[in-house]
Image (cartoon, coloured by chain):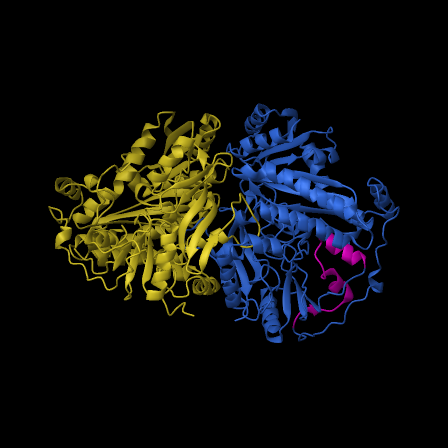
Chain colours: A yellow, B blue
């Protein structure tokens, strides 16, 4: 899907799709207070990399090339892109490992444990929470798993496949297509993130309801830990003790490296229908979405754009827009869509557009959605502050959360940048008992201060979420950036359990230290 | 719901519903090789209880009455009933604690930890896997939580309630009814099991598809551990690290006592429809159920009875019977039922009966289902071997599993009892990638040898399940009886993690030792 295009070392995706200077400038002109022209992208040859402090045995597949080290220094958060654009690669990994198979993974872990080298598992590198960036003083190795990219086995009867953890989204879907099957997990990062990364971070995918996280699609996991290989049985359901898979789901590379998983697949959908509904009032829209989420209809898509977000997407000013989609491989879906739009109408919605088959609106959205990170990078080059944060809370708190975020984070944006900027919201996933709001911030930054400015805005956002007991992350993971919010959210006995587990599975404390837990001596035995 | 009826100390449920001697004898006459009359139920006054070896401070709510100790000696497995009928209460708890609130729970744990007294949490006491029966040498306390039975808070907007862990099924539903809401979790043990017990054992409930386990209905948990209280935030979904709730779900009282949970509720269903479909061939029935499970239609009921099980339920000989049910609080369900029966017909099914509204067949089934444990007890008094075991596996292995269980467990029944007896199967829960078969064994036992005979049959069953990597339990939990099968199934690194967690949360090793993990010194620090 990405063809022979070159991956960007500083920004999202492939270099051929990055905005050029004129596009950046045109876009930047829409937001008052930005420079006229974008910051130049530095030539990697001019960027200083620290010397590599450690060398691995030649038997291990390890690279110290500047290109590899630069490409594995950061994830792809806004603050990562800004730092890379500023030519700051001071935290680059000493080594980049490129294991060719599970044996290499085990060998690398063994060597790193004995050599005291930190190991940060790296899938597609699309973390937006500092999940693949080590911030300590020890020598470290970024373990790039993308060579483990095969679908090893397909069980068409149970509709499941054994897939290696390093397979990028398009790579695994391409191998499933001849079987008429699909994993149908499409996070925004789909092209540049891996199955193992999705599992380790509990990624959110295609479905707005029901199976919102990759967690629900897991049949079994195979994980290489420093204490041995953990492989759960393939089971459709089980009640035998706490779920072993649920321990590794969300472990973010701190307990082991997910090398394989049996994943639940689906037939490719034959029937699709979608509708767009507008609401004059965002509160009415929330109520409509709640009614839909509680009706047991399980739409595949149920995305609510608030007025600001809808305006960006081209809707008339002041309206909220709800996009509904239904799909099935087994039966027609028109009647289900009608049930959904009926509910939306009962709550004051105006059905603006409904259709099946061609799905042009959905395709247009998808294209915009996938283009978004490139736009983000272009705006970052214009010194804009452009980032997102997401959460989830129960319905009883949603209106308060929405209002409080807009008040307090809006105030923080104004305080930090001197102007209110944009602060939009959409609901990405909905549940019978709550919803997952996703906020986008766009404001003018001051060249050279963007990271600090964003960090201030983010701190205000995290403070609101924590105060209202809304999760610090619905599907972006914890990484290093969300640690304060996560520490506030996580029950202390669970922290004890996690530390004890870390000590048992990673006694040398080499795996992604600083993520989820403090680095040693926090978990040291 | 149970009114003022007396709970049985030796068998299931309430004494007024137990079979009388004549009913036992009539039933027993259906199976060749049983005695003419049932074994007498001993008078509790004649049963020897070991002296209580420990006394608690008078400030703690503790009983040493023979009735309390007898009623808390065992769960309600077949082997428990047989041992109680034989007057064997040698393993009775030294103390029965009846905490009046969470503070008592914490005080009891603190005292027990300092006194070295084992604590076994006890909800409704319906464990069928030795989950509430301590088998070691230390003094032990059974902690009966049924006084913590309040619905503390209802959030009608998010459709959720904060409910104490000791609430029995009918007790919590009665408190939810005025709100028009229901938890709608109806395991067979519903009347005699508690929310906390369901959560600690990952109970299977009402729904045949989708939300099969109580796990999916949990919004947050509050757990008193010896290392402090763990309380997760109320969240509809989250991606912040491994799920804290999933650690306690299935922990079976080994890590803490679940005192409260915010549970996701539902509106009471307004529309219901059900149909019964017969299949001449069990393989075709499996295929039909697979097609239904993979079509995304999510029937509330999808229960397949194999020919033996169907014959017991009154169907014509040699046929399999599939019972389908659909229900909704939000919309009519007739079209969904039609989609389901269409799929069944496409796979050779004959739709024998379909209806909506009155649901008489479902009520009849429910009544038989709830009566079953009393029948089991009556047959136990007749020295029959009558017990169930359940599992789950992926579709690709189901036919082999079914055949192998029938061959090998059937052979074990014949070897142990001298006759094949009955070995029936139903699918209780189905998934897109597999199903949960539930087997019933009925055979003539030899008075005095029933437990040993059943243990031999069960060992044969567990051996087949383990060999085919089918779970040792889909929803009955691990307890003590399933330990060998669980140890085989559980990945060793997960065992390391669980032991480390146990050491961190229960350093004195007092909580339900022998369940999930070996008792100390296995987890000793």
Where is residue B385? Give x, y as percent. Answer: 76, 48
Residue A345 at least partly seen: no
**Which of the two residues, A34 or B157, is positioned nearer the viewer here?**
A34
Residue B276 at least partly seen: yes
Residue placed farthest to the left in the image?
A: A36
Where is residue A337? Give x, y as percent. Answer: 44, 29
Left of A400 or right of it: where is B280? Answer: right
Residue placed farthest to the front in the image?
A: A59
Residue appearing at x 42%, y 65% in the figure: A507
Relative vertical location of residue A245 with respect to residue A114 in this rendering, above or below: above
Where is residue A239? Give x, y as percent. Answer: 57, 50
Residue appearing at x 77%, y 66% in the figure: B66
Q: Quadrant of residue A299?
A: top left
Which residue range is magenta in the image? Answer: B60-86
Q: Magenta segment: does it hold B8?
A: no
- How many labels, in total? 0
Q: Magenta segment: does it hold B64?
A: yes
Relative vertical location of residue B92 with respect to residue B331 in this rendering, above or below: below
Where is residue A477? Give x, y as percent. Answer: 37, 52
């Amino acid at each position: 899907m990405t063809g022979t295009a070159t991956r960007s070392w500083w920004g999202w995706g492939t270099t051929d799709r990055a905005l050029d200077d004129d596009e950046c400038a045109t876009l930047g002109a829409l937001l008052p207070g930005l420079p006229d022209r974008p910051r130049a992208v530095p030539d990697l040859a001019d960027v200083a990399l620290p010397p590599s402090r450690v060398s691995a045995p030649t038997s291990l597949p390890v690279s110290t090339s500047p290109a590899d080290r630069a490409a594995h220094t950061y994830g792809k958060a806004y603050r990562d892109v800004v730092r890379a654009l500023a030519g700051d690669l001071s935290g680059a990994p000493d080594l980049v490992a490129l294991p060719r198979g599970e044996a290499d993974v085990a060998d690398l872990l063994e060597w790193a444990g004995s050599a005291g080298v930190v190991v940060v598992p790296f899938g597609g590198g699309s973390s937006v929470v500092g999940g693949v960036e080590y911030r300590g003083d020890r020598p470290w190795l970024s373990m790039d798993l993308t060579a483990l990219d095969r679908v090893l086995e397909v069980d068409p009867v149970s509709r499941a496949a054994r897939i290696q953890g390093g397979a990028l989204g398009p790579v695994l879907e391409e191998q499933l297509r001849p079987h008429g099957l699909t994993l149908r997990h499409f996070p925004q990062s789909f092209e540049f993130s891996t199955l193992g990364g999705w599992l380790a971070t509990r990624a959110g995918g295609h479905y707005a309801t029901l199976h919102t996280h990759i967690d629900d699609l897991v049949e079994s996991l195979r994980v290489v830990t420093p204490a041995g290989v953990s492989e759960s049985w393939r089971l459709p359901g089980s009640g035998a003790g706490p779920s072993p898979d649920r321990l590794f789901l969300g472990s973010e590379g701190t307990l082991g490296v997910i090398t394989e998983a049996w994943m639940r697949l689906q037939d490719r959908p034959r029937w699709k229908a979608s509708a767009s509904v507008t609401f004059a009032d965002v509160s009415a829209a929330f109520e409509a979405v709640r009614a839909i989420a509680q009706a047991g209809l399980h739409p595949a898509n149920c995305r609510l754009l608030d007025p600001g977000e809808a305006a960006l997407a081209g809707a008339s000013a002041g309206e909220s827009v709800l996009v509904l989609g239904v799909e099935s491989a087994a039966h027609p879906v028109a009647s289900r869509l009608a049930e959904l739009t009926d509910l939306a109408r009962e709550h004051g919605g105006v059905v603006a557009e409904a259709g099946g088959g061609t799905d042009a609106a959905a395709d247009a959205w998808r294209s915009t959605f996938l283009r978004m990170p490139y736009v983000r990078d272009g705006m970052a080059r214009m010194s804009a502050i452009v980032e997102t944060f997401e959460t989830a809370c129960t319905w009883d708190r949603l209106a308060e959360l929405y209002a409080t975020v807009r008040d307090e984070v809006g105030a923080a944006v104004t305080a930090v940048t001197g102007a209110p900027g944009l602060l939009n919201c959409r609901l990405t996933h909905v549940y019978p008992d709550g919803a997952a709001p996703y906020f986008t911030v766009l404001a003018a930054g001051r060249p050279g201060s963007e990271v600090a400015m964003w960090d201030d805005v983010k701190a205000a956002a995290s403070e609101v979420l924590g105060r209202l007991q809304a999760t610090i992350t619905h599907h972006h993971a914890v990484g290093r950036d969300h640690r304060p919010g996560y520490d506030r959210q996580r029950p202390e006995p669970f922290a004890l359990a996690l530390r004890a587990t870390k000590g048992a599975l990673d006694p040398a404390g080499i795996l992604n230290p600083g993520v989820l837990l403090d680095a040693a001596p926090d978990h040291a035995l």
